Image (cartoon, rainbow, N blue to C red):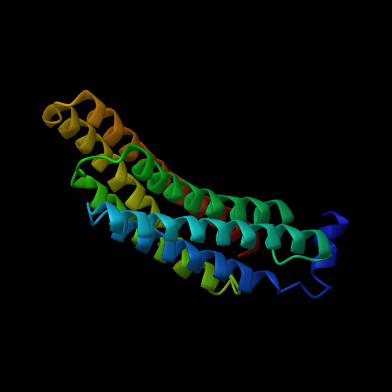
């Protein structure tokens, strides 16, 4: 057992991190909800409004991540291992960045229509974001909330598996029905980015599980 581990038993932990974690998780939910609105409309003017909102949330998330890293540099004793906090914050940032990537591709490519699975992916991302926020709210006491956090992480894994199935169905349908090669390329890349966003959400779950194993 190294000296840092021993000190953690005797020195009060810096709880300034928990409000930042919560702020990050709530921003994730807001981003997913606006993405769902974006993928619910093919009106270009409305799309531009939602894409702008997502970009603002992405910038806000970057600011929270930078604040967490600054707090790491200032804190002697942290609630979890430093590398786990850094990984956790980076993973949440990656989900928001990837959802922003969906919006930016829609803005750039201007697909004529959406494919139905887009909205299903948006639903999955909303559910995953809520599970992440729920898990984060329980991390103030991981020992007593171990089972609840585990179940939430399992739910995120289940959502990721569903997204994998949706992705393959979406690709199959796209190649079968889309006759315009340019539209096919556009829609395929948007679909791939949505699938990547769900993968990134599972990465957040994995980082939470790592914290849980060490703390609970």
| Residue occupying image coordinates x 29% and y 61% | 37
> Which x, y percent locates residue 96?
48, 53
Viewer-nearest residue: 143 or 41 = 41
> Quadrant of the rendered structure where residue 81 is?
bottom right
> Quadrant of the rendered structure where residue 19 is?
bottom right
Q: Is residue 117 visible?
A: yes
Viewer-nearest residue: 67 or 172 = 67
> Which x, y percent locates residue 9?
80, 70
Check the image and report above or below for 151 versus 210.
below
> Which x, y percent locates residue 200?
47, 46
| Residue occupying image coordinates x 56% and y 70% | 23
Viewer-nearest residue: 187 or 12 = 187
Position of 38 compared to 96: left or right?
A: left
User: Number of labelled discs?
Assistant: 0
Position of 74 compared to 188: left or right?
A: right
Check the image and report above or below for 103 versus 108.
below
Residue extending farthest front: 45
Position of 41 compared to 87: left or right?
A: left
| Residue occupying image coordinates x 52% and y 73% | 137
> Which x, y percent locates residue 78?
75, 65
Q: Quadrant of the N terminus?
A: bottom right
């Amino acid at each position: 057992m190294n000296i840092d581990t021993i000190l953690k038993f005797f020195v009060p932990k810096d709880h300034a991190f928990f409000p930042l974690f919560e702020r990050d998780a709530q921003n994730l939910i807001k981003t997913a909800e606006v993405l769902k609105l974006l993928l619910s409309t093919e009106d270009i003017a409305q799309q531009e409004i939602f894409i702008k909102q997502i970009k603002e949330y992405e910038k806000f998330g970057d600011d929270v991540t930078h604040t967490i890293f600054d707090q790491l540099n200032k804190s002697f004793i942290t609630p979890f291992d430093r590398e786990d906090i850094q990984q956790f914050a980076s993973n949440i940032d990656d989900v928001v960045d990837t959802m922003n990537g969906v919006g930016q591709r829609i803005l750039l490519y201007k697909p004529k229509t959406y494919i139905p699975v887009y909205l299903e992916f948006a639903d999955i991302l909303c559910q995953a974001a809520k599970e992440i926020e729920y898990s984060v709210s329980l991390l103030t006491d991981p020992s007593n909330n171990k089972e609840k956090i585990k179940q939430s992480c399992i739910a995120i894994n289940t959502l990721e598996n569903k997204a994998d199935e949706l992705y393959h169905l979406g690709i199959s349908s796209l190649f079968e029905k889309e006759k315009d090669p340019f539209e096919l390329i556009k829609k395929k890349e948007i679909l791939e980015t949505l699938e990547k966003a769900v993968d990134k959400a599972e990465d957040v779950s994995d980082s939470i599980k790592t914290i849980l194993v060490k703390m609970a």
